[in-house]
Image (spheres, rainbow, N blue to C red):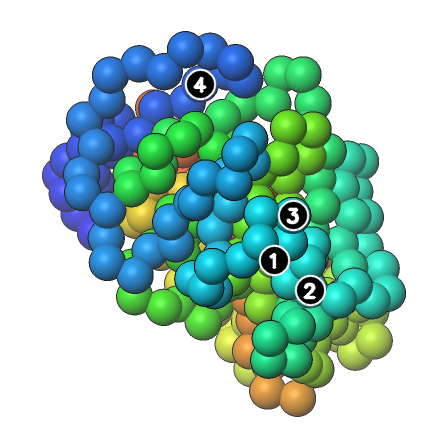
Amino acid sequence: MTKQNWSRTKISLQQIVEIHDHGEAPVSEVLPAAEEGVLQPQDVHTPASSSEDDEAEEPENNHIFWRYEFGSKLGEGSNSHVHAGTRCKDGLKVAVKIAEKTPNMPYIRVPGHPKHLPMEIGLTLMANKGPRVPQIIKLLDWQDDPDHYVMVFERPVPSMSMFSFVKLQRRLNEEMARNVMSQVIHASKICCERGVFHRDIKLENLIVNPDTLEVKLIDFGCGTLMKDLPTWPSMVCLLAACLAH
């Protein structure tokens, strides 16, 4: 992408999306029409939710927790935890992230969605928008509740964190490292083109299939919008620094 094209992209993104603090009144925004096939939230009283299952359900059974069986804990952060799960309707293996909300958690307006969404949900939707990119984790389902939000992701089997994989391998040869790096850079480039700056690319936020070396970028919880960007050379240097973390 040329510097001139990058500048045009930056300007258009400022017209499309804006950040809001939790509880702030919505402002007028220029939003394009929703893309066909993009997950749409449905009103379930207070929560906002999105699901691939469009069948009508009883209101008390419409919460996202009714659609999945939960298994062992895969990991946890300061205000979230991730569990292995199975989608009830077809047995698909998934990962379910439950995050508690904080008082100053930012919200974001995403084109095609009538309500403001928690930043992490909004950025993940944006990163998934458009043609499928295997190197970016796929968001399958989500729900925004008053005190927490839930995100359901694909869970490749087998897979492990890149941190665990490197620790197991002790070192990666040049060919393996080049393969991994090219996938991570591709995922980062697509995210940037879609208006998402991940900001936390590290071994723990990459998962890898140990048999095929297929890599996926995960966890947009520290991300932000591509607004007020540094110059493109600075972005490249920053990406290299993140990958070297």
**Distance from label 4 to label 3 (Cα)?**
30 Å
| Residue 29 percent location from the top left of the image | 23, 22
The tag earlier along the polypeptide, 4 or 2, is 4
**Distance from label 1 to label 2 (Cα)?**
9 Å
Q: Nearer the viewer, mark 4 or mark 3?
A: 3
Instruction: Tell me if mark 3 has few (under 14), some (14-19) or many (20+) residues whose alpha carbon lies within 10 angstroms of its own.
Output: few
Instruction: Tell me if mark 4 has few (under 14), some (14-19) or many (20+) residues whose alpha carbon lies within 10 angstroms of its own.
Output: some
Q: Is residue 243 visible?
A: no
Question: Quick check: 60 left or right of 110?
Answer: right
Q: What residue type is disc 1 on? A: Val
- Classify mark 4: helix, strand or loop: strand
Q: Residue at x 78, y 48 (%)?
A: 81
| Residue 92 percent location from the top left of the image | 62, 77
**Distance from label 4 to label 2 (Cα)?**
31 Å
- Classify mark 3: helix, strand or loop: helix
Q: Which residue is mark 2?
A: 68
Between residues 182 and 129, which one lies in front from this camera angle? Answer: 129
Q: What residue type is disc 2 on? A: Tyr
* Numbered badge on residue 152: 1
Q: What residue type is disc 3 on? A: Glu
Q: Which residue is mark 3?
A: 60
Q: Nearer the viewer, mark 1 or mark 2?
A: 2
Q: Residue at x 33, y 56 (%)?
A: 38
Q: Nearer the viewer, mark 3 or mark 1?
A: 3
Question: Quick check: 123 left or right of 14?
Answer: right
**Distance from label 1 to label 4 (Cα)?**
24 Å
Q: Which residue is mark 4?
A: 20
- Classify mark 1: helix, strand or loop: strand
